[in-house]
Structure formats: structure tokens, C-alpha cells
Amino acid sequence: MFLGIDLGTSEIKLLLLDEQHTIVATTGVALTVQRPQPLWSEQDPAAWWAALDQGMATLKAQHGAALAQVRGIGLSGQMHGAVTLDAANQVLRPAILWNDGRSGPQCEQMMAACPELPAITGNLAMPGFTAPKLAWMRQHEPELFAKVAKVLLPKDWLRFELSGEFFSEMSDAAGTLWLDVAQRCWSPVALELSGLNESHMPRLVEGSAASATLKPELAQRWGVPAGIPIAGGGGDNAASAVGMGVVKPGDGFLSLGTSGVIFLCNEAFSPNPARAVHAFCHALPDTWHQMSVILSAASALRWATLMLGMPGGEADLIAKAAALPPTQRDQAPIFLPYLSGERTPHNNANAKGVFFGLTHEHGAAEMGYAVLEGVGFALLDGWQALQAGGGNAEQLWLVGGGARSEWWAKLLASLLNVRLVNGVGAEAGGALGAARLAWLATGGTVDEVCRTPDIARVAEPDLALAAALQPRFERFQRLYQALRSEFS
């Protein structure tokens, strides 16, 4: 039995996996995000720990016999967040999250000071990454920055609480802008740009290797065996890839979660920073991946659902959008889904969400359609950036909360001109990948552990639909260019 822990932005998920690949149990505890100022996005790490403890208590009450058989723990989590600790290992301030946009000026300063940074890290300096957040602290919170003894990523802070040890792994560390991604080690040059050095960093292991072990008092409290190892784990997308069996070159997936991600597995380090494509280490040794990332995907749908007061939730809004005849879809407004800024291909933390072309005739159905289509257009922008750098795939696994809608899947498959495949159990995502990494860390092999799931359904591209959408996509692109100077 293996325990996977996935620290998301909106929820922490726990999953128990047995050696027959059966998901024995799952549970989740909701989390909230604080936005005290424009562009800011923060969470209190203490809330993560309280949620984890609550989730473990639930598992113990409902599946105590399975917990008693756990052989290893794996961790997955939201990437890029900055958890700062002082010399007494106390958290100095709320964690600055992946979708925080405050450090745009620091990104410009870092790129000017070190033009070779993308060649080292595989990525442009973006406000989402960890390094600019510390550069922001250095300038705006100098008294706190002077106390920083360790900087941890969100899941790695949980690891510290679980074990008392400081470790990270390659896939999550690649998202800090401090890692030499080709060499899979910390870069002194990149660290110096934030006023830090390697002493501020945790030790590195591969995601499929053991790191620390669970504290005895926690093992006793939660009813798991003493001394079990904690795997390196993975950043949320790399862990999701492991959970889907996306571990070989040419494999890929599309994730419709809070953010939207297209993930392609590579056999070598393949940066394309000019198009704001991410090039990161995978959670498995000697493997890398590329990603295009939009910051609002299913979260844009959730926002629209709340704004429009849909009594049936997201499914209600999707149903209304899907029922629109083609002539009304063609007259729907255009939506730019940049509610939290944007990454690929624009790298613009100041980008904003926009409805363009509203009239008295438009209602919830048209606005809902515009949101679903606009997320698709943003993903297509990213897909074209990946293709420009040589990335491609014949099919992509479809994962995340937005993957439940067959209609939206058909729309996205048509826009991207790629088959989208839903796998059985795909909703488990990073928690399943984390459990699999725990399995690998205790002696499992990649072929044995990293199986692809059974296919639940397939969305094939509709070329006629794609052709009909092309003029609206071109207008979508022109709108961003026309409005770009107004966003700041």
C-alpha cells in the first residue's frame, strides 16, 4: 500500500494505492487563497498542515487497516510557491503562490543582470517562479529577507513537517528558476540573482528516490508503520504525468485544473524560452518535459459560473453553452481568460480578463460559451508555441476537473487538432502520481508502476468545427495585441 499526498491550490488530496493498481481510498480537504492586494496570491502554510492532519484523520477513521499497510509516502504539490523559514525553522510570512504577479519588475531586473539565465534554467524569468519572489522580498521586505535561512516549495515544507528534513526533487526545483535544468543541480549564478546561495536550498533527490522518513510520533498518530520512506515526489504536473503513465518521449497530457497545462515528455533538455514555454526536469531520472501554461482554465469557468449565479454549477453553464446553435455561437462575445495574468506565450502578469462584443442579446449561455472557447483559444496559443519548438503528439491524455465535460473536450480536440483521451481514474491526478513515486522509491520498476490507464472515452478532432472557429481565434489574438499596452 502506498500513500500519495497532493497539495493543490484549492484542495489537499490524499490517496491510497495498492500493488494491484487499485485506488483503495481518497479524501480531500478544501483550501482557500488570500489576495490582500492586486496581483498578490498567498496561503498560510499552517492551513496546509491542518488540512493534511484532517485528511489523515479521515483516512484513519475510514480505512485504518489500509493505512497500517502503507510502505511509502509520495508528495505532489503546487509548484513555484515560496515558503521562507528563519534559523529556528519558523515560517516568516505567508507563502507567495504560483499565480502571484507582484514580482514583474524583479523579473526584468534578473533578465537584465543575467541574460544567460534562460540557457541555465530553461525558462524566462516570470513572476510565477520562486526566484523573483525572493528578489521581491529582498527589495520590499528587507528585514524579513535578512532572516531567511531556508526556502522551500509548498510540498517540500510539508515534507519538512513530516520528517524534520530539508529535501526537494528535480521536477519541482526546476520551477524555481534556481536550478541548472540540464545538469539537475542548483545553479550558483541563478541563486546569486536573488541574494541567496546553496545553503538556503534543500538537498535534491530524484522524484522516484527515497528522501527522508516519517517522524515516529506522526506514524503513531496516523496509524502507519514507523520508519517508512518519503519519496522525492514531483511538482503537480510531473506527478500527474507519472499517474497517467506519461513517462516516455512523445507522451503528453492536457490538464484542465485551476490552470491549464499542455505537458510533453522529452528525452533531453529542450528549452524554448522565447515563446514562454517551460522546460523542466521530469520526476524520473534522465527525463525532461516541456509545458505551455495558462493561469486560468477551469478556474475561469468556476468564476463565470459564480458571476452568472448558475444554480446547477459549472455543469449547468456548460450545458447552456453546448445548446447554443452555431449561428449564436458565432455572435457570442470573445473572452480573454487572463484573470490571473498569463504565461505561455505572452509572459504577462498584468494581462486581464476581457469580454469583448457584448450586446443586449447576450445572456448566460453566450457568456459561458465565450469563456469555454476563450480558454480553448489560450490553450491553442500555447500549443502552437510548443509546436514551434518541435513539440508534438498524436494524442494527449485529458485530466483535471474540466475533463468531465465531453462537449468541452470535443471543442478542445478540434482546436488543437489532436485526439484527447480520458483515462479511467484520471481525476486522481497528482495524488496518484505521488503514490506511484512512493512505490518506485520502495523498489518498484517504471514498467511495472507507470502504466497508462484504461481508456474511458475519446474526443476526436472535428476539422469542420476547427475551420469555423479559426476567424474567432484570429480575432482573439488581435484583441490581446490591441489591448496589451492597456493592461499595465
Image (spheres, rainbow, N blue to C red):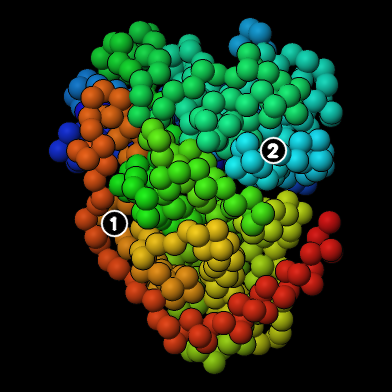
Q: Is residue 279 left or right of residue 88?
A: left
On the image, the x and y values in percent for residue 205 come to 44, 23
Q: Is residue 163 visible?
A: yes
Image-based side of 94 in relation to 398, left or right: right
Question: What residue is shown at x 84% (from left), y 64% (from top)?
Answer: 486
Find numbered disc 1 in the image and state the secondary structure of the residue it sits on. Answer: strand
Is the C terminus in the top left, top right, bottom left or bottom right quadrant?
bottom right
Measuring 45% from the left and 44% from the top, which residue is drawn there?
268
Residue farthest to the bottom?
Answer: 327
Circle 2 residue: 117
Residue 101 against residue 225 in the figure, above or below: below
Instruction: Decide: few, some or many residues near mark 2? Use Cα within 10 Å; few <14, some 14-19, many ≥20.
Output: many
Q: Find disc 1 in the rendering and name its residue.
A: 423
State the residue at coordinates (76%, 69%): 481
Instruction: Assess disc 1: are there few (<14), some (14-19) or many (≥20) residues with their C-alpha within 10 Å of its C-alpha.
Output: some
Q: Which mark is residue 93?
A: none
The image shows residue 133 at horizontal and vertical percentages of 72, 33
Residue 7 seen in the figure? no
Looking at the rendered structure, the kind of residue marked 2 is: Leu
Give me the residue at 63% from left, 26% from top. Answer: 187
Which of 201 and 158 lies nearest the eye of the viewer? 201
Establish if 252 lies above or below 13. below
Which sits in the foreground, 3 or 473? 473
Q: Is residue 105 left or right of residue 423?
A: right
First along the sequence among labels 2 and 1? 2
| Percent of width and height locating residue 440 | 28, 29
Tell me the quadrant of the picture where the N terminus can be found: top left
In the rendered structure, the answer to whether residue 425 lies left or right of residue 20 reads right
Q: Residue pushed farthest left?
A: 20
> In the image, is residue 23 above or below residue 90?
below
Question: Dots 2 and 1: beta carbons under 8 Å?
Answer: no
Per the model, the C-alpha gap separating discs 2 and 1 is: 38 Å
